[in-house]
Image (cartoon, coloured by chain):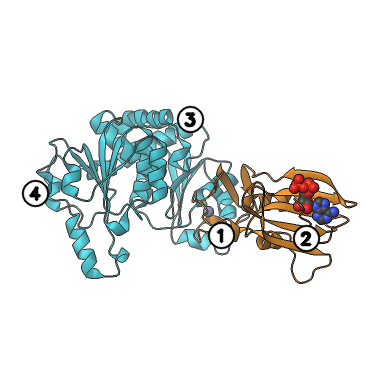
Amino acid sequence: MKELKVTPIKNGTVIDHITTGMALKVLKILGIGENIASTVSVVIHVPSAKKSWKDILKVEDRELSPREVDKIALIAPDATINIIRNYSVAEKYRVQVPDVARAILQCANPSCITNSDEPLETEFLVKSKDPLRVRCKYCERELEDIASNLL
Amino acid sequence: MDFRGTDLISIADLSKEAIYEVLDVAREMTPIARGEMMDERLKGKVLATLFFEPSTRTRLSFESATQRLGGRVLSFGMPEATSITKGETLADTVRMVEAYSDILVLRHPQEGAARLAAEFSEKPVINAGDGAGQHPTQTLLDLFTIWDEKEVIEGIRVVLLGDLKYGRTVHSLAYALALLGAELTLVAPPTLQMPREIVDLVRELGREPKQVEDPREAIKDADVLYVTRIQKERFPDPQEYLKVAGSYRIDLPLLRDGRKDLIIMHPLPRVKEIAPEVDRTPHALYFRQAFNGVPVRMALLSLILGA
Ligand SMILES: Nc1ncnc2c1ncn2[C@@H]1O[C@H](COP(=O)(O)OP(=O)(O)O)[C@@H](O)[C@H]1O
Ligand SMILES: [Zn+2]
């Protein structure tokens, strides 16, 4: 499949197999907004061999932190991270949904103790990975909308 | 299970065996709770109650439990609790109070508060209710009441009736009863049904709950009828409230279809869910249930403090 609809990047990261519709959320996780310094291409809703549709993100001159990768895993569990060095894929791995999501999600329950001014980090236990279901360790409620509650 | 030094935050922290251990010790404690026997095993121990929300029953029964076993109680209640904590985090309050005591009992309006307290306290923490969340000692005293009366829990047919949506006691109870092998029947008005999450939990334990609309139908072959309060605030329309509350009211004519040895429980305070004439029947177990809070809490304190 000839796919490179966008200019190749020399160094950077390609996030492939993003659950379709989630590319903009991934951009947000990477903090890519108005004050952008490098080239970013966003490809939304392209045919995929694995699942029927996917999104792709290509970010120049940027590698991801483990925390960013964990966040991406929560909204796009099939994503692959391709590190590009000198125009070719130097490293490639699939994101992994962690067993415990620490300090990356906010509890949607307004009366949960984690939403008050206490010195703690949120912690969500992953009850199932496919479909992804997480539960707050403190109030024990399941978090329904994971994508909108990323910290 | 070795309870020494452990926290009790959620009923799900306890295995089946651990629950029965608590029930066994609670039975031993009953004569002491009644004042028929003396026991000083908590002599020299200090329990701190930290109540950020009003509660009479739970707090008094913890205090009674401690004192019956020769221990002492430090109470940080309302309004002191609010003044100590002006601008102070719960984490800091807990670290202060634990310095004065051997065990902490916490009631707080926010869910997860007890879990947080346990993380910051070296001393054991018992959750006495956190918002709409857990209230494990209530669950244990409900289980004790059933077990003490029926001798078994496995296979017992329990009807949970009333507000099954907001009534926090019934959520943990449904889970615990399923864990111990009881058969559940749920009876609630359409807008106050048991949350799906809890029904799923019960299902995962291999106990498909029956859902029945008619209370009369539900209690026919029941061993236990657990009634919760339907609150007026849950209904936008007062007429609708009156209608619903009326059709879930437990009275003598309704009980005619039930078994002779049916027991009726209620976490109290009751308003109109159970007619006063039922109090005089052998079915009424709700006052004993309230008393059972004392031996159950004695059992927990004794196990956790290793005394
Ligand atoms: N130099 C590059 N610039 C931009 N995108 C690239 C570059 N090299 C590879 N890619 C993209 O990274 C992803 C992973 O590449 P590759 O491992 O070759 O393919 P696949 O994972 O589909 O087998 C693909 O979406 C590919 O288009
Ligand atoms: Zn929470």
Q: CA distance from mark 4 to mark 1?
A: 49 Å
Within 10 Å of the Cα at label 1, are there few (<14), some (14-19), or many (20+) other Cα atoms?
some
Total numbered circles: 4
Q: Which chain is cyan?
A: B
Percent of width and height locating residue B33: 31, 36
> Which residue carries the number 4 mark?
B253
Mark 3 or mark 1: which is in front?
1
Q: CA distance from mark 3 to mark 2?
A: 70 Å
Mark 4 and mark 3 lie on one chain; the one further toward the N terminus is: 4
Which three-letter amino acid code belongs to the residue tagged 1?
Asn
> Which residue carries the number 1 mark?
A115
State the mark number for residue A8: none
Mark 1 and mark 2 lie on one chain; the one further toward the N terminus is: 2
Percent of width and height locating residue B293: 33, 41
Q: In the image, are marks 3 and 1 on the same chain? A: no
Q: Is residue B242 left or right of residue B145?
A: left
Q: CA distance from mark 3 to mark 1?
A: 35 Å
Label 2, secondary structure: give it.
loop
Q: Is residue B194 left or right of residue B46?
A: left
Which three-letter amino acid code belongs to the residue tagged 4?
Pro
Q: Which chain is orange?
A: A
Q: Is residue B289 visible?
A: yes
> Which residue carries the number 3 mark?
B306
| Dot 2: chain letter | A
Label 4, secondary structure: give it.
helix
Within 10 Å of the Cα at label 2, are there few (<14), some (14-19), or many (20+) other Cα atoms?
few
